[in-house]
Image (tube, rainbow, N blue to C red):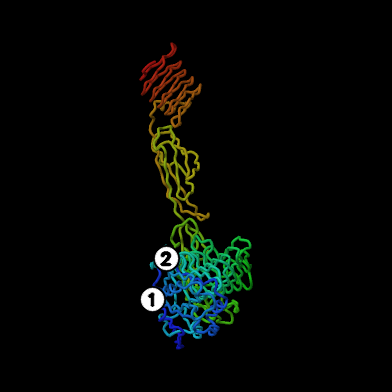
Amino acid sequence: MKKTPKHSLAPAIGALSLIRAAMNTPALQPLHHPARSAMTLKTHPLLRMTTAALLLAASSSALAQGSSSNMRFVYISSTAELQAAANELAKVGKGDVDGPATKANPYNVYLLAAGTYKVPLNLLEGRAVAALYGGFPPGFAGYTSFTDASFPGALATRDLKNNVTVLSGDLNNNGIVDDGDAASVVTLTSRLTATILDGFHIEGALESAVKVDGGRPVLRNLVIRGNAGHGLQITGGATSSIDNVLIHGNGGTGLVVEGATPSFTGLTIAGNGKASTAVGGLSCTGTGGNCGTYRNTIIWDNTGGAVAVSADSPAPNPTFHYSLVQGCKVGGTWNPACGIEGSNNLADADPRFVDAQFCTARPNRAGNYRLKTTSPALNLGDNTATTRPKDLDGLARVQASTIDLGAYEGGVVAPAVNGACGTANGAATSMAPTGCALCATGTATAVIGSNGAWGWVCNGSDGGSASPACAAPYASQTLSISVNPSSVAVGATATVTAESTSGLKPTLSRSSDSTAGCTVGTTSNTSTGVQATVSTQSAGACGLLANHPGTGDTGTARFLAAQRVSAILTVNAPTSACERYRSRAGANVIDLRSSPGGQTVRGEASKFNVIFGSAFADTITGGNAGNCIDGGAGNDRLTAGSGENYLYGGDGNDTLTPGSGSTAMDGGAGTDKCGLASSRATATYTSCESN
């Protein structure tokens, strides 16, 4: 760890002993705030501009102009100490903060040592909070105390990279963002003063990690990451100044500006937004501001896009200078949907972060958003825009002749990364795989489908080798087939239906090893597959087949060939005495057995008629060249004609009437009535209850 020089200046206030003594005072014991109150830093609206000017100078030599009695340095090394200080401030009334700082009413400057602070704090309506500074070594090693004169030097020697100071919303201490955590970690409600928040990692909030409502607070040297909602939200006409800030890995939008006019420089917004996030980069809404000015800024690799400007009137357009904003200057032409192009913005090009973590689920705290030495964002910024002499790593803000874009300065020589196939490799899919599933590391080539599979290669980066060939087979499909009914008598019909899990339409056919005489009719489409009518001519097993050969290497959705499936329709020998006459030369066959209701039919006059009735009440009249009529089930009325006649009533209460020729009548089951033959005709009677 880099050591900070020891300061031997005499203390203006024995701050460390003061705050620890305050913790032992009963009136200053930690308050039990609701979990969602988190930390709120609210400066009083009546503070005069002289107060604001002094606070803004907190890291400049201007502080030396104030007497030490006007600054109260509070050393914080634990959440309990920070909470005790908040309790003390909450006791002070509004009248105590009016006017400039005095010995009795000093500015409070919180100095936080490295560590994690889970802060259900509420600093409301109390004495002015001048600033919060993180990045000091654990236990403030190397320091004795601060004065107004020594403080700027102490800030300049902080080691933010190694003395990480975290403000966390993880109030239930389970390491994940859930309902037990703070809605926001820091809320700044500042009307006239310029509260400073400097040198922190802010994470673990359910909603917006940092909320700014009005005023002109100063935010700098911040990493806002791993929050379930938005990273930074600025509302209420705020004119905040934001410098050296990285916003990444948040589940919502990285930066939300609503009716405000902040000023940004050295800003990186990357890797924000869940799949459902409309825009993961910058969202501009409202009519109270123009969404601010952005210099030396990178907005890249955010779900849903880089910038979204609402349709409010006037439009809250952001203005960009010396910035790289994804999708906003493709091919060198500015997209007005992104806002206003100021000057010297870069054409779209991958900024080449060391480790962007774009494919990691959010919220997350992983990633390295420093720039590689091959980044197009190096040495192309505006030197006059930055107010910070160092970046988030403590490097001098200008390494070459020109400042870099984003929150970090200087290119990083990244190690070679070999390409490796991602989770899509080997996973069957009908559609070409895309996005993060293609490569675990490296960048995917175009995906091409051939020989039953999608194929691609993951190229390495920074001198790394390419992966072996990656492949995902086309999706398989499963067929099903059914026949209804599954058993019929000769001459009856059935319906065969086939479906595929792919949604493709199978083909239907008769199996060559069928022992029954059967024919598959014309196929028609259904909502889920196909169907056809199967007619039968002789008894035996009618084999039915469903098949689909797949799509081959064509089409947007591609499937492998399906395994053929089969079904058997059993065709039974004749069950009606009339079946024997079906094959008579010139016979007219009328088969009503599959009809949904009773039928009325008449046979042809000049042909021998073979008529099979339905399962319902039918009225059937024969022709004049002989007839065999089987009424089947139902209460049927059967009438013979001239010539040779055979009437079979079947089930039900039937009425059989002989014709002018010979008629053999069999009433069958039920109570049947068989008529008497005329004097010129002959008739025989079986199972007839009356005539």
564 vs 405, nearest the viewer: 405
Assign the N terminus to one quadrant of the image.
bottom left
Count every numbered label the image shows and give the total. 2
Assign the C terminus to one quadrant of the image.
top left
Q: At 47% across and 63% down in the image, what residue appears?
A: 437
450 vs 279, nearest the viewer: 279
Indicate left or right for 432 with 17 as reference.
right
Asked whether residue 496 is in view, the answer is: yes
Residue 25, numbered circle: 1
Residue 35, numbered circle: 2
Say what amino acid the circle numbered 2 marks: Ala
Q: Which mark lies nearer to you, 2 or 1?
A: 1
Q: In the picture, residue 112 is in which quadrant?
A: bottom left
Vertically, is 389 above or below 614?
below
Report, in whole angstroms, how far the alpha carbon at label 2 lies from the one at label 1: 24 Å
Residue 214 position, x and y percent, is 55, 68
Residue 331 position, x and y percent, is 62, 68
Say what amino acid the circle numbered 1 marks: Thr
Query: Callout 1: helix, strand or loop?
Result: loop
Residue 170 position, x and y percent, is 41, 68
Circle 2 Cα neighbour tier, 10 Å, few/some/many (<14 / 14–19 / ≥20): some
Residue 356 position, x and y percent, is 49, 70
* Label located before the other in sequence (2 or 1): 1
Query: Callout 2: helix, strand or loop?
Result: helix
